[in-house]
Amino acid sequence: MTDSQAPTATAPHGTNPIAPTPSGVRTAADVVTPEVVAQLTRGVVGSGRTANHTPFTGEKLADLPESTPADVATAFERARAAQTAWAATPARARAAVLLRFHDLVLARQAEVLDLIQLETGKARLHAHEEVQAVAVAARHYGRKAPSYLKPKGHTGAIPTLTKVTEVRQPRGVVGQIAPWNYPFELSIGDALPALVSGNALVMKPDTETALTALWARDLIIEAGLPAEVFQVVIGEGPVVGPELVKHADFVSFTGSTRTGREVARGAADRLVGVSLELGGKNAMLVLEDADIEKAASGAVRACFSSAGQLCISIERLYVHESVADAFLERFAARTKAMRLGNSLAYGADMGSLAGERQLEAVRRHVEEAVAKGATLVAGGAHRTDIGPLFYEPTILDGVEAPMAVCTEETFGPVVSVYRFKDEDEAVTAANATPYGLNASVWTRSGSRGHAVAARLRTGTVNINEGYAPAYGSVQSPMGGMKDSGLGRRHGSEGILKYTEAQTVAHQRVMPMAPSFGMDDEKYAAFMSRSLKAMKALRLR
């Protein structure tokens, strides 16, 4: 689309001018060339053929190898054969790969930004959130992995006589199932701690966003990772997913709660561990003392980044009744002013939905809510004038049960506004969901924000921002409570989950048994006196 062709369409509840495509901006054909596809797919174990498409137009991007169950088994065989030598590589040398990868990502970010946009349809600034997240994770584990993984001494059964060391052993070959919505961060971002801890990896990216994950694999190999350590399989989830769970020594999964339960059952049958980040119906609480201008601006980011296709984005907005009208006026004005765009350039405020399934869920939730009495404050239009899957950022007021949008995860640019009278009511409503992934609290009082946060049953809480501060603080754990998952990414928990703890106890001088002429009774008395002494000395 050229500047002269870029229309500005007026929707029933506001105007969303399209960000015009600057002259000279790259197209899909410029980015996804046959040479690029050949380079990236070298690492895929697949004997069949499939394809992926761009949400911007619906057109095919690339032909890709498709993996069969036998191909998955082959990928694990290759990874397992390479894992022993990789695990024997010193932790500092493995970590150095991540630091080199960090530099390469930042130097060549334009390449992956194009791929992320073409495969997901998101705006370029939202694609850059993935670049930021991956760089931060690579830096963190590149610096901290050796200390997370180093052997740790502990007090033995008999101090000085028992020397105990906790050793962290890699699990072996990690199976990773990565989603489509954040194909860079939720593929390689989760792979980094698994790899640096000495594991090999077999990844199944979503077919529609496989090029982004393959670009990440290609880049980390350039940074020094042995190619055989990182295998990729591509195919339909119901076919390839169970096969991956069947062979893995640990499974990392990000996706829906329904599929997460299936993954957990498959892993449980084999007694292997899992890490699951699943769905969310996240709440934002705007208290009566909040800065309304900042809260309205923050709500746009919290609700509509990546067109709402973010597990930790906000779908329920609870606003104190004393400021609700003022907040909603400002929030609606900012939402109506958002620019929708489909070019590989900065400037658009929101991009496209990623697929027909997401579009259908959004339309169903909005249309049902309006039919049952909800008020459409902003948005509500399917914007085919921009692309087949564009939908305006939408605000609903007056939403009540049993409207589906109340409780079901929409995973799109739709937020429902609810009014509350007091803090207890807001906390109760925010917690009234089977999910518990993320929450946001807006108040001028830091102490009040922390007090409210402590009452919310979510894995992360952000005060005066939507989701980015907690997620970006990679030294701290991130994950879900309740139906939002098991395990954590980031920090020590995010890397130690990919290891097995091994205790090595070295007994010196005397055995843990009668010795030095003691009979059973004297030994028992000696140990009793020793236990009392250890308590008196406050030994653990």
Image (cartoon, rainbow, N blue to C red):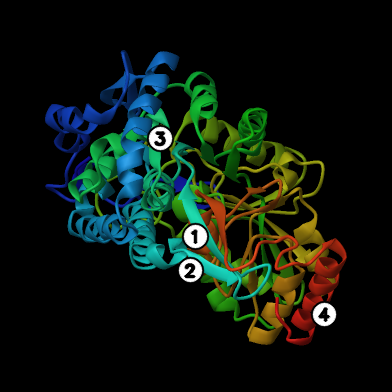
Amino acid beneath label 4: Lys
254, 367: nearer the viewer: 254
Name the element at disc 3: strand
Amino acid beneath label 2: Gln
Query: Which dot marks residue 475?
Result: 2
171, 508: nearer the viewer: 508
For the residues labelled 3 and 1, say whether their Cβ atoms are less than 8 Å apart. no
**Marks 4 and 1, the one that precedes in the sequence:** 1
**Marks 4 and 2, the one that precedes in the sequence:** 2
**Marks 1 and 2, the one that precedes in the sequence:** 2
* Residue pointed to by mark 3: 203
Name the element at disc 2: loop
The quadrant of the rendering that contains the N terminus is: top left
The quadrant of the rendering that contains the C terminus is: bottom right
| Residue at figure coordinates x 55%, y 39% from the top left | 255
> Marks 4 and 1, how far apart in space?
41 Å
Left or right placement of residue 36 versus residue 310 in this view = left
**Marks 4 and 3, the one that precedes in the sequence:** 3
Q: Quadrant of residue 37?
A: top left
Name the element at disc 1: loop
347, 398: nearer the viewer: 347
Q: Nearer the viewer, mark 4 or mark 3?
A: 4
Q: Can you give x and y, in whole percent of width and height, for residue 239 in the image?
A: 50, 18
For the residues labelled 1 and 2, say whether their Cβ atoms are less than 8 Å apart. yes
Q: How many marks?
A: 4
Left or right placement of residue 233 versus residue 324 in this view = left
Name the element at disc 4: helix
* Residue pointed to by mark 1: 490
> Marks 1 and 2, how far apart in space?
6 Å
* Residue pointed to by mark 4: 532
| Residue at figure coordinates x 38%, y 40% from the top left | 200
| Residue at figure coordinates x 41%, y 22% from the top left | 72
